[in-house]
Image: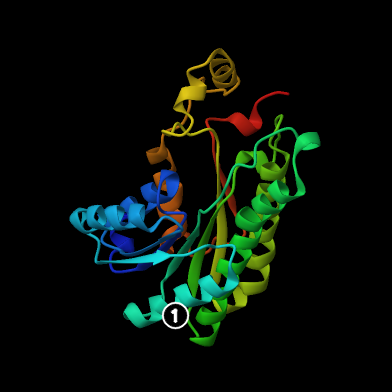
Amino acid sequence: MDLGAMLKGKGVLVTGASSGLGAHFARLAARNGARVVIAARRKAKLEALATELKALGAAGVLVLEMDVGDDAAIRAGFEAIDADGGPVDVVVNNAGVGGDGAAIDMSPADFDSTVQINLRGVWLTATEAARRWRDAKRGGAIINIASILGERVMHHVVPYAATKAAVIQMTKGLALEWARYGIRVNAIAPGYILTDINDAYFATEAGQAMIKRVPMRRLGRADELDGAWLLLATEASSWMTGSVIAVDGGHLVSSL
């Protein structure tokens, strides 16, 4: 089964697409001939990515300067999508922030900011898409990017881990409510993926010690999420909803 071919011509919205995993998922969709909608707050980065996506073979590219924590911005974004050629088929809730720091020293504003993007943003984007799909009497697929920290925890990530745990539970609850509309809601829970944001940390002694706690004794690569992502984005997962796929080198099953 060619999962990539099943994505050709589909509309895919990726939030938080200006860098990291969001940009990676957008490139993956483009290489497989999807019509890609990239959304984030940094428009200049999105414009540069849009040029790249067109060269990769995207059926079309739409850039949305959109803050997922702002419900008005999300509504405007979906209206722009409709005006550009119709509803998307797949929504990837990838936008997120770290919210690192000792809980006892964290300000309420920092906590609220993490919840605003990581949890409220997922809720607002998912529900806006679902209402439009329901009213159009068509299905759709939502992929929420969670984290293994939604099921396990470490020091100094309390708000982040709490929001990712909530995203996992939200995924299951929305899947239950929306199955009757043909809307599938699933999640990917990545483990530690090497990116340009964290490579300096993982080169340190503390970072190397963390890698040793992963059963496979290495970090993951962004492309190692591709199989799970393509599965959930296509009809290959037509009877999957409410599922959370961990892609983590065995980290979740490691001993305490």
Left or right position of 7 against 237: left
Q: Residue at x 68, y 60 (%)?
A: 170
Residue lying farthest to the top in this orientation: 205
Quadrant in which the C terminus appears: top right
Q: Secondary structure at mark 1?
A: helix
Percent position (x, y) of residue 206? 59, 17
- Name the spot of residue 75 as percent of width and height, x first: 52, 76
Q: Using the image as rendered, state which of residue 120 and residue 109 is in the foreground.
A: 109
> What residue occupies the far right of the structure in this picture?
104
The amino acid type, in three-letter code, at marker 1 is Glu
Judge whether 84 appears above or below 55 on screen: below
Residue that carries the numbered disc 1 in the rendered image = 79
Please report the residue visible at 38 percent of the width from the left and 49 percent of the height from the top.
Answer: 23
**Along the line of sight, which residue is nearer the eye, 7 or 135?**
135
The image's colour scheme reads: rainbow
Residue 194's image quarter?
top left
In the image, 88 versus 157, the foreground residue is 157
Percent coordinates x, y for residue 185 in the rendering:
57, 63
Q: Is residue 129 visible?
A: no
Left or right? Give the position of 8 relative to 239: left
- 24 sits left or right of 167 in the view: left
Mark yes or no: residue 45 visible. yes
* Outermost residue to the left: 55
Give the vertical position of 224 relative to 73 (above or below).
above
Q: Residue at x 34, y 68 (%)?
A: 10
Residue 215 location, quadrant: top right
Quadrant of the image for the N terminus? bottom left
Task: Please provide percent x and percent y for residue 204.
Answer: 52, 16
Label 1, residues with CA under 10 Å away: few <14, some 14-19, many ≥20: few
Numbered-mark total: 1
